[in-house]
Structure formats: structure tokens, C-alpha cells
Image (tube, rainbow, N blue to C red):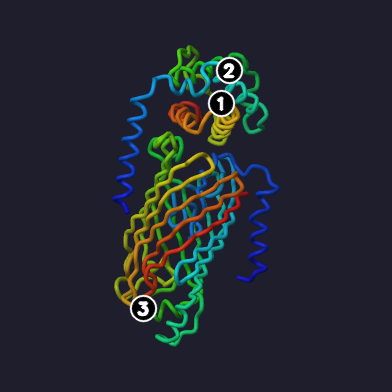
């Protein structure tokens, strides 16, 4: 049984490497609908956030346009698109907000729902989340 | 349990699904499902995940019913769990093992007239550190399960030393995003110290050994999407009773989590030899409501 699991895991890792090697570097960017697709997702995300009592107060008074452009730049760059995020680093942006796990989870949920709404496939959703999750320690409890 | 009690429980289980608001902020399926021992996990193996969707500022709970029908036995489990701030999980479970034809064998061999074994399990689990989704080292929890047999006549007759026992376990769980065919993969490893025979339903300790043994338990699952998880579990066991062989357990499962309120799990379980009955295999079905 354990031997099967190890074999399965080894195959998983190998296949993971293979798909990365053969596809274009901006495959995820394409899957997200390029820059217009990403902006539509981020805009949808912001609508969901301001509608959610758990987190809306953390976004009160922000410049909506700046938020949409900034986060879209970030996602575009992370996903291999031709953009560069030039805003402040994540620690600076979230300093003093004391963001809880509940609030972080709420935003993650809305991002997934926004991607679903814009028909981003499960695989592309997962790959974007994999790129965003390492930012968790820079965002929560700052 | 009477039919009426079951009906009331079922209603209580489905009610939150129909009426209440979202039960907590943790992402879908990150509460796992309810194990046969009441702790959050898979079906047979407790995971480091805490029950419900309570995040760091919330509390939440689950109610669940499960049934496993293997070749010669039927196990029914009714369980409830409460989680505070994704830090502490408290659980209770009642297991009823219907002995079916084995009750005749017991009558022949020991003159015992019992047609079921009943065990209560009180569990506590603490998330020590980490987060299953967000930390590279995953989430690690420490848990105990205190188990009490309601009747000790059968376990005593077959050589068990004690009616009650306490399992201690350390569990680690980690979700790897887009790890296999761009799907998220959940891995769990649990190390358990236990004296239990068949999870305690046949008592604790025996003529073949009466000390704590370390058991390795593992699960691996892949999320087809955020609602469907398929995977396998393995649970190592002791063999303390000379009267019958005891095997390790394993299962293949599919869990459907259509919303935060409801989880349905089906599994193919292989319990091996149980109390002289060989090759106990069959279906497992569990229903969980979260509030």
C-alpha cells in the first residue's frame, strides 16, 4: 500500500515537471484571459469584497481604480504576462491592518468565486493560487 | 439507537444545510469530514484539520452519521464536534457494531448473548501550528481519543485487558496547490499511540500485548475540483489478541462537498480479518452537516 502511494507520488512529481517544461511561459496568463480577463476578475473580486461584512471595512477609503490596476499588474506579472507591478510591497501595503485568517480566507474565497464566474478552469485557478499563497505571511497579521 | 432518534439527528444534520448562514470562513473542504472515531479527518484516519469551517475569529460544529457494511459486521457511528477559532476541536462519537452472524459464534464459543458492541469516544484535538493551505510546512495537530466500551463482556471473554483506553496522535496535513495534473493534492500523516483492539470495539490490550504501540496512518487525496476529493487511506493496527488475527485497514474514498453545510463521503473499506471473520470488506457511507 505505502509502496503504491510512493509510486503515485513519484509519477505526480514527474508529470508536474513535464507539463511545465512543454507549455509556453505565459500559458497561465492566457488561461486567465490575458490583461482584460484579469482586470475583469479583479473588478468582480472588489465588488464581492465590498459586499462582505467580514472584510468590507478593511477596504473602506481605498482608491478602487488603483486597487484594480495594482492587483491586475501583480497577477499579470505572476502568471507570465507582459506586466510589471510597480506598487508598494505587500508588507507595506498591509501594515497596521491586522488582517486575520478569517479575512484572508474571505478574500481567497471571493477570488476563487470571481475566477469561476469568469470561467477560469480548475487547473488555472489552482496554479494562480499556488503563486499567490506564498504572500500569506506578508499579508496576515501585519 | 431507535429509528426516531436517528430521524431527529438526520433532521438536525440537514437543517443547517437548508437554513443557516455560511458556517465559518475557512475554504471549502478544509474541515475534512468526520472519521469513525468522531475527529475530523478522512473516514478511518484523523487529520491535522479541525472540524467545521471556524477560522481564527469564529467557532463552528459538525453533526454526522456514518455506516460501514462489511462482510460480517455493520458499524454505525453518530458523532458531533465543536471547533473554537480553528484552534481546539472537541468531539463525541458513539460507535455501534452490529455483530450479525458473529453473535451465534459468540454464543457457541463463550455462551455470550450479545448482538452488538457499543463504544463512546471523547476526542480533543489542538492545532499546534501551521495552516494546511498557507504554510509550506503544513498544519500540525495533537489529539487524544478517550474510548469507553458500554459493555465489556465480549472484549473480556476474548482476552482484552481493559474496557477503556486513550489513544494519542500527532497529525500533519498539507495541501499542495496544482501539484498533480494542475489539481490540488492533500497529504496527511498521523502517528498514533494506542492499545486498542479494532479501534477499541474489542477492548484494549490483550494476552498478546498490553502496552502502547506506535501506529503509522496516512492519507492522500486529490481535489478534482473544489467540491470533489478522491483518495486513499491506510491505518496500521496492533495485534494484541491471540484469539483472532487483526489486520491493518485501508480504504479508497470519494468525498463530495457541495457547500460548506454538507459533506457526503463514500468509501470502499478493507478491514482485513476482524474477530476471526476473514476479509471484512465493504462500503462506507457518511453524511456530515456543518453549522
Name the mark nearer the viewer: 2 or 1: 2
Residue A24 picture quarter: top left
Residue at figure coordinates x 56%, y 44% from the top left: B53
**Chain under disc 2:** A
Q: Which mark is residue A68?
A: 2
* Contact between labelled residues 1 and 2, with CB atoms less than 8 Å apart: no
SS assignment at label 2: helix
Residue at figure coordinates x 34%, y 59% from the top left: B236
**Chain under disc 1:** A
Name the N-terminal-most of marks 2 and 1: 2
Specify few, some or many for label 2: CA neighbours under 10 Å numbering under 14, 14-19, or 20 or more. many
**Marks 2 and 1: same chain?**
yes
- Measured along the vertical axis of the image, is residue B171 above or below residue A18? below
Q: Nearer the viewer, residue A113 or B146?
A: A113
- Measured along the vertical axis of the image, is residue B216 above or below residue B174? below
Q: CA distance from mark 1 to mark 3?
A: 61 Å
Q: Which mark is residue B29?
A: none
SS assignment at label 3: loop
- Measured along the vertical axis of the image, is residue A67 above or below residue B115? above
* Contact between labelled residues 3 and 1, with CB atoms less than 8 Å apart: no
The residue identified by callout 3 is: B159
Residue B167 picture quarter: bottom left
Where in the figure is residue B261, as x and y percent of width and height? 61, 47
Amino acid at each position: 500500500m505505502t509502496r503504491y502511494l510512493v509510486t503515485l507520488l513519484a509519477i505526480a512529481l514527474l508529470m508536474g515537471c513535464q507539463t511545465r517544461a512543454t507549455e509556453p511561459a505565459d500559458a497561465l496568463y492566457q488561461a486567465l484571459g490575458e490583461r482584460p480577463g484579469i482586470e475583469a476578475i479583479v473588478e468582480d473580486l472588489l465588488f464581492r469584497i465590498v459586499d462582505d461584512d467580514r472584510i468590507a471595512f478593511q477596504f473602506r477609503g481605498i482608491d478602487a481604480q488603483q486597487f484594480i490596476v495594482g492587483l491586475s499588474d501583480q497577477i499579470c506579472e505572476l502568471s507570465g504576462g507582459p506586466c510589471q507591478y510597480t506598487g508598494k510591497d505587500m508588507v507595506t501595503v498591509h501594515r497596521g491592518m491586522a488582517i486575520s485568517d478569517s479575512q484572508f480566507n474571505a478574500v481567497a474565497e471571493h477570488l476563487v468565486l470571481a475566477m469561476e464566474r469568469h470561467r477560469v478552469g480548475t487547473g488555472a485557478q489552482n496554479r494562480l493560487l499556488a503563486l499567490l499563497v506564498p504572500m500569506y505571511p506578508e499579508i496576515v497579521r501585519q | 439507537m431507535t429509528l426516531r432518534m436517528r430521524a431527529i439527528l438526520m433532521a438536525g444534520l440537514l437543517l443547517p444545510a437548508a437554513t443557516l448562514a455560511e458556517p465559518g470562513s475557512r475554504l471549502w473542504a478544509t474541515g475534512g469530514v468526520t472519521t469513525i472515531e468522531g475527529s475530523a479527518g478522512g473516514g478511518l484516519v484523523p487529520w491535522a484539520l479541525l472540524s467545521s469551517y471556524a477560522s481564527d475569529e469564529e467557532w463552528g460544529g459538525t453533526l454526522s452519521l456514518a455506516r460501514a457494511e462489511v462482510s460480517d459486521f455493520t458499524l454505525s457511528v453518530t458523532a458531533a464536534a465543536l471547533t473554537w477559532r480553528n484552534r481546539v476541536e472537541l468531539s463525541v462519537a458513539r460507535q455501534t457494531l452490529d455483530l450479525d452472524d458473529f453473535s451465534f459464534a459468540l454464543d457457541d464459543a463463550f455462551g455470550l448473548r450479545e448482538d452488538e458492541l457499543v463504544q463512546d469516544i471523547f476526542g480533543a484535538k489542538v492545532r499546534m501550528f501551521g495552516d494546511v493551505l498557507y504554510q509550506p510546512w503544513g498544519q500540525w495537530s495533537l489529539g487524544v481519543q478517550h474510548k469507553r466500551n458500554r459493555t465489556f463482556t465480549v472484549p473480556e471473554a476474548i482476552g482484552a485487558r481493559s474496557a477503556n483506553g486513550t489513544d494519542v496522535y500527532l497529525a500533519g496535513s498539507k495541501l499542495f496547490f496544482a501539484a498533480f495534473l494542475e489539481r490540488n493534492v492533500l497529504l496527511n500523516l498521523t502517528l498514533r499511540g494506542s492499545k486498542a483492539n479494532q479501534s477499541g470495539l474489542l477492548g484494549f490490550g490483550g494476552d498478546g500485548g498490553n502496552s502502547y504501540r506506535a501506529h503509522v496512518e496516512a492519507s492522500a487525496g486529490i481535489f478534482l475540483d473544489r467540491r470533489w476529493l478522491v483518495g486513499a487511506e491506510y491505518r496500521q493496527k496492533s495485534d494484541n489478541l491471540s484469539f483472532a488475527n487483526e489486520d491493518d485497514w485501508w480504504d479508497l474514498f470519494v468525498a463530495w462537498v457541495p457547500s460548506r453545510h454538507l459533506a457526503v463521503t463514500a468509501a470502499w473499506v478493507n478491514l482485513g480479518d476482524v474477530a476471526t471473520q476473514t476479509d471484512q470488506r465493504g462500503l462506507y457511507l457518511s453524511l456530515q452537516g456543518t453549522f
